[in-house]
């Protein structure tokens, strides 16, 4: 079905434009946003006649010399044609009509309006009218049944309704479309069309397909589609014969199908890719006129006028005798010349048979053209190709390659996160966690309003937008505005620095065209950018996407003193066939983004800077056409702040939209079970508190209370999951959970397992606890040996210890209250231990005065945080960064009971299991009475109980000195530590056990010294308990005997 696409020509001002032919097909009639109706004698008519019908003309219809128009004064008017004389007002609505159409005889007009109503009016007597009520949103289109019994209408409420005109009732309603709040926001105009003559089929454009519904039964009989259609179909129109159906889409594609074979027989593309918003067939069937949203008029010419009448006859007549003259495809076409000359690949729509000989030469000797896939400008122009049958010996036309794979995806346009589209007269130029910038550009005002969420930051501002700013951003310090360049002026960047302490609070810079102000280049066009503090996040097109996917890359740069690139051009993960809709940072500085499918992803710095999905806003949407417009993300508390938009992707400026808060949820398995919920909460807590370690490493002051609370919550969740696994007899899982626990919480888990009579599990947990104690002690010695000043930060460790001890209380309370007497004693013991430990800090600190003072406040706080990570067993498992706050704040508990509960358990662990950490407090408590250390060797060897490492060092010191005679003492210790770590776990354990055999006497001395140093009677009572405990320590080192003693020593 060859046709020629004529060049487009200007018809009306930019905006929605409609077109139709008169009854004779001699005139083309258009209306547009300028309020004019133009009457063209042909596409080349340079002086068309025009009729002004109002400020804007939204729709028109022409029949029997009557021209009906829907204008912006909420009326439907009649003019004579072609004279253009006013012939009265047909009907009125409370708001503007959106679409008008005639019935087949021209006696009635149907009109749909934005006030949700459809009216059917007699042309001869406008008082005879019927009103069809039932739509819940503006009406998109209306179409008369050719037999005048039914009327079909489509609406922004998502429904397509067929009405019985006489009864004014709904015959059928289909929920086919996305809901929107206005015609301007609708993805498609959904212009319906009945098949002429019999009215057998109603064609309804739905997304990228056309649904055909049968008249009377209203069954969905088939769908017409095409693989090359990538955007929603806007409008459909039947040929006068009723055999062909033409469709125009949002992306500018125009497609013609043969209804009998369901095959696409013609594809054309708008020369600039603009949206096709109206189609009309010439009554002769030889032309299709179309208009776009830019006000231009175009024409497809050359459709055969005889196709509709004679096509079927010759094919049936000749099929018997001339099988070799026509091939399979041509039973739907008149002759070879009309088959494929200018048409690209043609494929059956549904499950029709595909030709196996598409690339074979028919008997005519002429090769079929299967090219021109994306742009018909490249198609061949063989107008006379079918007029004669060429001999088979004629030279072959070279075959054009055919591509049938996924099609390239149009790259999404650049946008600014937090802003609504720039073409709106009233829009949000920026909405973020600081405030709102609104832009107004209408007949009354061209201004910008700046409003702050917290008025203490700055008062609201009203700015005159004389430069035509189209972009804005807002922070706690400044307002930034930018405008594009014009023919006379360069683009400008304006900054209102309201927080500046000097008098110059405003500056402006020109950005001349062609001048590159960037300090680095990107591999592709920028899509959007976002900044936070010293971080800059950039997303750009890294390649061409296919099959509806965008191929985006992301770079994350940090502009601190040491500038570095954290993410270097990695692909940005997006949902299938979605695009990026929001990009930014959380309030705490973690990059995150949202795609058009509503999936929120956040950067996971601890997993190699990967992106973790943390929320899906579509799960909370009630309708397919509802969306959430994100305005901010917070990690503590965990909040996704967004604005719900019904039937739209962005909110209107008035009335002021309300902000909703959505919860986060990781897409884990079995989240409906108790185990799955606790796992999701644990890993979400871990992810959402990575920012503590990042901020502290970047030199920022962090909230240690929140960090400690998060870790406490994390350990509580682990202990709850451990208890649940114990009840379910999943001991292997219990051991996996224990690997994630801190050393002291593992001790609590051992107690729980022992009381549950799970001795094998308790034995395995004791090995894990011992290994964790070794790791902690090695880390402590690594800090302690070379630099004694690290102990000046122990106060932060003690605070973390108290917080962690609260984490174990909840599970301990489940075990009963049978250990109250021990709790009291342990509380006293802990008081003494803390005093002794503090004294040790002071003594050692005095040896290095330069490191204990003179630091900025931020540095001291960060030092405390660093110390809490390394020196306290309760503050996190070895080598793992601290993260994890709490979703729900926990109620504070009495401090003394908390200490007693967990510390009593800790004492049992240290006395009965002889875990490695017992040697650390012993040395700490012994130091206050000792003079300041003279050397590291003297301190560690003479004043402290020996550890497995020290014992190994004594025996291997000579070998190390022999190999490295020039090493200093501290370097020898570092070298020894490195070699000690290379030993297997069993060898290190054996050295530790040997060292413990020598530590009993040291423990006795420690207990006596602590008792002597006390000032009240309670501290003297410690002596008796210390002796009892030291006696227990001298028992056999067999693990099973130790474990049984630990489990049942008080029962």
Image (cartoon, rainbow, N blue to C red):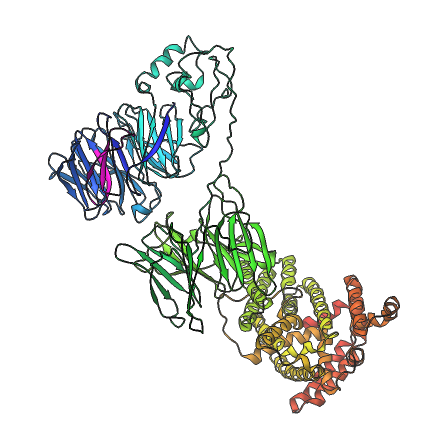
The tally of labels here is 0
In the displayed structure, does residue 867 sit left or right of residue 667?
right
Residue 335 is covered by the magenta coloring: no
Q: Position of residue 653 (x, y in %)?
A: 32, 57
In the displayed structure, does residue 876 sit left or right of residue 940?
left
Q: Which residues are magenta?
A: 34-61
In the displayed structure, does residue 90 sit left or right of residue 189?
left
Closest to the observer: 634 or 824?
634
Q: Position of residue 33 (x, y in %)?
A: 26, 43
| Quadrant where the N terminus is found in the figure | top left
Q: Position of residue 228 (x, y in %)?
A: 44, 33
Please say if 19 is above or below 500: above
Closest to the observer: 263 or 269?
269
Q: Is residue 386 visible?
A: yes
User: Which residue sits at x=52%, y=22%?
Assistant: 399
| Quadrant where the C terminus is found in the figure | bottom right
Please say if 522 is above or below 195: below
Closest to the observer: 257 or 71?
71
Residue 39 is covered by the magenta coloring: yes
Q: Position of residue 68 (x, y in %)?
A: 19, 36
Residue 201, located in which quarter of the rendered image? top left
Residue 297, located in which quarter of the rendered image? top left
Q: Is residue 347 visible?
A: no
User: Which residue sits at x=23%, y=35%?
Assistant: 38
In the displayed structure, does residue 224 sit left or right of residue 171?
right
Residue 1031, located in which quarter of the rendered image? bottom right
Please say if 354 is above or below 729: above
User: Which residue sits at x=22%, y=37%?
Assistant: 37
């Amino acid at each position: 079905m060859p046709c020629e696409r004529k060049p487009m020509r200007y018809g009306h001002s930019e905006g929605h434009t409609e077109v139709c032919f008169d009854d004779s097909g001699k005139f083309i009639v258009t209306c547009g946003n300028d309020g004019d109706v133009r009457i063209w004698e042909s596409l080349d008519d340079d002086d068309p006649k025009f009729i002004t019908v109002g400020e804007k003309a939204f729709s028109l219809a022409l029949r029997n010399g009557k021209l009906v128009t829907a204008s912006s004064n909420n009326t439907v008017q009649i003019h004579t044609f072609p004279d253009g004389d006013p012939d009265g007002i047909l009907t009125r609505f409370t708001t503007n009509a959106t679409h008008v159409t005639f019935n087949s005889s021209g006696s009635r007009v149907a009109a749909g309006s934005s006030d949700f109503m459809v009216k059917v009016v007699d042309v001869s007597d406008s008082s005879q009218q019927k009103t069809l009520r039932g739509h819940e949103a503006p009406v998109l289109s209306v179409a008369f049944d050719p037999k005048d019994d039914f009327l079909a209408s489509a609406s922004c409420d998502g429904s397509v309704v067929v009405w019985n005109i006489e009864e004014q009732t709904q015959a059928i309603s289909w929920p086919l479309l996305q809901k929107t709040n206005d015609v301007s926001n609708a993805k498609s105009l959904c212009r319906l069309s009945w098949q002429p003559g019999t009215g057998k089929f109603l064609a309804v454009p739905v997304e990228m397909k056309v649904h055909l519904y049968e008249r009377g039964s209203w069954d969905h009989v088939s769908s017409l589609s095409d693989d090359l259609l990538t955007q929603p179909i806007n409008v459909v129109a039947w040929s006068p014969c009723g055999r062909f159906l033409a469709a125009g889409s949002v992306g500018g594609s125009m497609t013609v199908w043969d209804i009998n074979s369901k095959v696409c027989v013609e594809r054309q593309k708008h020369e600039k890719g603009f949206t096709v918003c109206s189609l009309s067939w010439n009554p002769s069937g030889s032309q299709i006129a179309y208009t776009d949203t830019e006000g231009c008029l175009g024409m497809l010419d050359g459709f055969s006028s005889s196709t509709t009448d004679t096509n079927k006859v010759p094919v049936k007549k000749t099929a018997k005798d001339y099988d070799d003259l026509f091939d399979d495809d041509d039973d739907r076409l008149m002759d070879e010349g009309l088959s494929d000359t200018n048409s690209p690949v043609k494929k059956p729509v549904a499950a029709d048979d595909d030709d196996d000989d598409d690339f074979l030469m028919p008997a005519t000797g002429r090769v079929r053209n299967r090219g021109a896939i994306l742009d018909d400008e490249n198609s061949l122009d063989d107008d006379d190709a079918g007029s004669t049958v060429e001999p088979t010996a004629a030279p072959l036309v070279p075959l054009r390659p055919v591509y049938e794979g996924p099609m390239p995806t149009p790259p999404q346009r650049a946008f600014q996160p937090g802003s609504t589209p720039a073409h709106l007269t009233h829009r949000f130029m920026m909405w973020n966690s600081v405030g709102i910038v609104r832009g107004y550009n209408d007949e009354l005002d061209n201004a910008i309003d700046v409003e702050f969420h917290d008025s203490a930051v700055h008062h609201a501002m009203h700015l005159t937008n004389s430069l035509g700013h189209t972009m804005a951003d807002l922070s706690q310090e400044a307002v930034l505005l930018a405008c594009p360049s014009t023919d006379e002026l360069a683009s400008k960047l304006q900054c209102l620095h309201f927080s500046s302490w000097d008098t110059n609070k405003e500056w402006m810079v020109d950005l001349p065209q062609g001048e590159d102000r960037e300090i680095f280049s990107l591999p592709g066009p920028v899509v959007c950018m976002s900044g936070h503090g010293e971080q800059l996040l950039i997303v750009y097109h890294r390649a061409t996407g296919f099959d509806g996917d965008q191929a985006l890359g992301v770079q994350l740069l940090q502009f601190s003193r040491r500038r570095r690139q954290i993410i270097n051009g990695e692909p940005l993960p997006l949902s299938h066939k979605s695009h990026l809709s929001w990009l930014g940072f959380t309030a705490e500085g973690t990059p995150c983004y949202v795609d058009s499918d509503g999936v929120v992803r956040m950067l996971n710095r601890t997993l190699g800077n990967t992106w973790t999905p943390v929320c899906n806003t579509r799960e909370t949407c009630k309708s397919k056409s509802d969306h959430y417009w994100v305005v901010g993300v917070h990690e503590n508390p965990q909040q996704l702040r967004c604005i719900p938009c019904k039937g739209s992707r962005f909110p209107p400026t008035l009335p002021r939209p309300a902000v909703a808060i959505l919860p986060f949820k990781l897409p884990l398995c079995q989240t409906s079970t108790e185990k799955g919920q606790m796992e999701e909460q644990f890993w979400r807590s871990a992810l959402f508190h990575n920012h503590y370690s990042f901020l502290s490493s970047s030199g920022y002051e962090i909230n240690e209370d929140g960090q400690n609370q998060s870790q406490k919550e994390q350990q509580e969740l682990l202990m709850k999951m451990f208890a649940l696994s114990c009840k379910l007899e999943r001991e292997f899982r219990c051991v996996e959970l224990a690997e994630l626990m801190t050393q002291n919480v593992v001790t609590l888990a051992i107690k729980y397992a022992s009381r549950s009579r799970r001795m094998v599990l308790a034995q395995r947990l004791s090995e894990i606890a011992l290994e964790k104690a070794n790791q902690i002690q090695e880390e402590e010695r690594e800090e302690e040996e070379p630099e004694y000043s690290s102990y000046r930060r122990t106060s932060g460790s003690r605070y973390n210890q108290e917080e962690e001890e609260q984490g174990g209380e909840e599970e301990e309370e489940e075990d009963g209250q049978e250990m109250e007497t021990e709790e009291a004693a342990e509380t006293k013991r802990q008081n003494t231990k803390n005093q002794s430990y503090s004294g040790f800090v002071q003594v050692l600190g005095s040896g290095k005065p330069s490191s204990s003072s003179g630091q900025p406040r931020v540095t001291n706080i960060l030092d405390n945080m660093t110390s809490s990570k390394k020196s306290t067993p309760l503050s996190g498992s070895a080598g793992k960064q601290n993260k994890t706050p709490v979703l729900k704040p926990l109620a504070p508990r009495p401090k003394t009971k908390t200490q007693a509960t967990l510390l009593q358990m800790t004492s049992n662990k240290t006395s009965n299991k002889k875990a490695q950490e017992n040697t650390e407090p012993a040395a700490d408590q012994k130091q206050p009475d000792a003079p300041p250390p003279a050397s590291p060797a003297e301190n560690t060897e003479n004043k402290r109980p020996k550890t497995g490492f020290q014992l190994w060092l004594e025996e291997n010191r000579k070998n190390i000195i022999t190999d490295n005679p020039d090493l200093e003492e501290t370097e020898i210790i570092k070298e020894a530590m490195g070699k000690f770590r290379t030993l297997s776990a069993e060898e290190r354990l054996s050295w530790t056990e040997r060292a413990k055999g020598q530590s009993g006497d040291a423990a006795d001395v420690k207990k006596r010294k602590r008792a002597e140093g006390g000032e009240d009677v309670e501290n003297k009572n410690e002596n008796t308990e210390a002796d009892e405990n030291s006696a227990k320590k001298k028992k056999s080192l067999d693990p099973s005997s130790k474990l049984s003693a630990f489990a049942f020593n008080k029962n």
